[in-house]
Amino acid sequence: MSLEEPAERADSAVEGVAAPDADALAALVGDDLLDREEHVNAPAFVIRPDAVQDVLSRLKEKAGFDHLACVTAQEYHDRYETIYHLRSYDDPTREVGVVVPTTRDDPVSESADPVFRTADWHEREAYDLIGIEYEDHPDLRRILLPETWQGHPLSMDYDQTKPQIVTLREHANPLEEDHRGDGADADTMFINVGPHHPATHGVLHLQTTLDGEQVADVEPDIGYIHRCEEQMCQQGTYRHQIMPFPDRWDWLSSGLLNEWAYARTAEDLADITVPEYAQVVRTMGAELSRLANHFIAIGTYALDVFGEFTVAFMYAMRDREVVQDVLEDLTGQRMMFNYLRLGGVAWDVPEPRADFFDSIRSFLDELPAKLDEYHTLLSSNELFQMRCADTGYLDPDVAREYGVTGPVARASGVDYDLRRDDPYGYYPELDWDVVTEDDGDNYARVLCRLRELEESAKIIEQCVDLLEGWPEDDRQVQANVPRTLKPEPDTEIYRAVEAAKGELGIYIRADGTDTPARFKIRSPCFSNLQALPEMAEGEYVPDMIATLGSLDTIMGEVDR
């Protein structure tokens, strides 16, 4: 494969695109290469800590790796390590890992921020939790924990019994000189939006600087609901104890999508093949979760824009409840499903099967008329158009720089969907389309989610048709998985799925035991939210609120 001409997507991603030429990539890394590794998903190159920007620039510009999907930091007994997981937006099956070791005495390496803007928050998190420092980083400070926190919680020498005193700091105006405008007497004011405010969709604090009535600068302040999900997963066994946790990341009905992210990673790590029947059940359940998520995203967005309990919100909650009823029948739970298992699903669809499928078909039959109502209330509403059209613009190149994925990226014309581009489950066998919009504004993001509801319905209907006619003797819901899983030591993998909000990825490093040595969650909301200042600067405060709502962030997934 040519380094200068990355493979075109077309239909080749479905059929399986050849992996990038590791030797050619090694030659591109050149003298900065210290060693080579082979991760389960991709080749990996160990490089000098002072060559990060040069190596990433060459891989980005000459080899087409323009998507920094994830940054993982970890500590070993003899070193610290940062892994940059690179993919291509044109073909995410082309992956490569860049491993940057540093000594324990001097854990400092170059920052990737000048090459990939999304590295800003990812490296701040690595510094906050692990203790690695990054030279040339524009703002290296804590991101999840308070500035006064002592120590780094994921470092080996961290004392978990030590009490912490978190002091309050006086708020300062962060406005820089280049934001003041043309006049020396610019009218600037610092205001806090949140963390406890309905417009922030959870415990999110927006440190906002206004120049008159326009947003001159906004800094999302996160970490208020950091729940140590990665640490808890590292303490759980692969086979039984980790699967209940993903439901609690994006808790708004997206549980099956979250569970699939872990299932796909662990199954590839342990070389587990999922039965075809179970893949169909997974695909149906995942798209039901996507429906439920998009309904509440659209309904709450109507609240953001109109500022009251609108008809659109009530309709969205009504329709979401019907989907929740179906998911409850399937999984036994209404939100925290815990339905997927490594190798399949917990059990088959409920009996009587005909009644269960009829309930799904009844909803799908009514959905087109309901979508017409949403378009009447929202996309065709003149007031809604005035509030959303031409506000919150996200340039497609900026979206790629920040690692934005999901409906937010696709509404900016970034044609990227892992269900098609890095296929898994039963998606390659079904007839459906990836939805994109080109305008890149708040209005386009609403249209994108409304159209994705139609595509999810198409997928679900095809799955129901398949499951209804599936021979009874061939309805295998789980593979034969060992009771205890112990992947080989130092086996490493990064895998992702197309969750409701974008690329939800997981990195796992095994150490030969039945629990992971490192478990890293790549949250789509984390990278998407980081792009908010690019979208809100220069707009009015109500536009900023509308832009934030259009991102559909869940703080439980941002903070983890």
Image (cartoon, grey):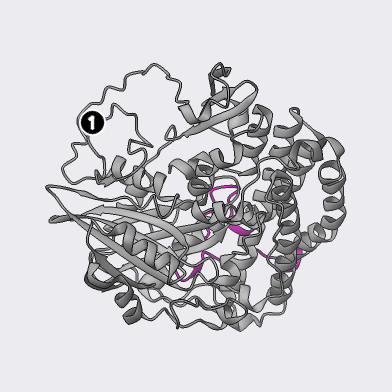
Pointer 1: what residue?
Answer: 150
Q: Is residue 67 above or below residue 45?
A: above
Is 98 on the left or on the right of 384, as rendered?
A: left
Q: Residue at x 47, y 52 (%)?
A: 246
Q: Is residue 422 above or below residue 244?
A: below
Q: Residue at x 61, y 67 (%)?
A: 283
Based on the picture, tell me whether residue 333 belongs to the magenta stretch: yes
Q: Quadrant of residue 454?
A: bottom right
Number of callouts = 1
Position of the N terminus, as image quadrant, is bottom left
Judged from the image, the secondary structure of the residue bearing numbered disc 1 is loop
What is the x, y in percent for residue 64? 47, 69
Whether residue 348 can be seen here: no
Name the amino acid, label 1. Gln
Q: Is residue 537 above or below residue 242?
A: above
Position of the C terminus, as image quadrant, is top left
Q: Circle 1: is it few (<14), some (14-19), or many (20+) Cα within 10 Å?
A: some
Q: Residue at x 74, y 65 (%)?
A: 357
Q: Main secondary structure of the magenta part?
A: loop
What is the x, y in percent for residue 174? 45, 25
Q: Nearer the viewer, residue 464 or 257?
A: 257
Q: Residue at x 27, y 64 (%)?
A: 510
What is the x, y in percent for residue 119? 40, 50
Q: Nearer the viewer, residue 354 or 237?
A: 237
Whether residue 402 can be seen here: yes
Which residues fall within the magenta stretch? 330-355
What is the x, y in percent for residue 294? 68, 50
Q: Nearer the viewer, residue 232 or 137?
A: 137
Q: Nearer the viewer, residue 272 or 518?
A: 518
Based on the picture, tell me whether residue 471 belongs to the magenta stretch: no
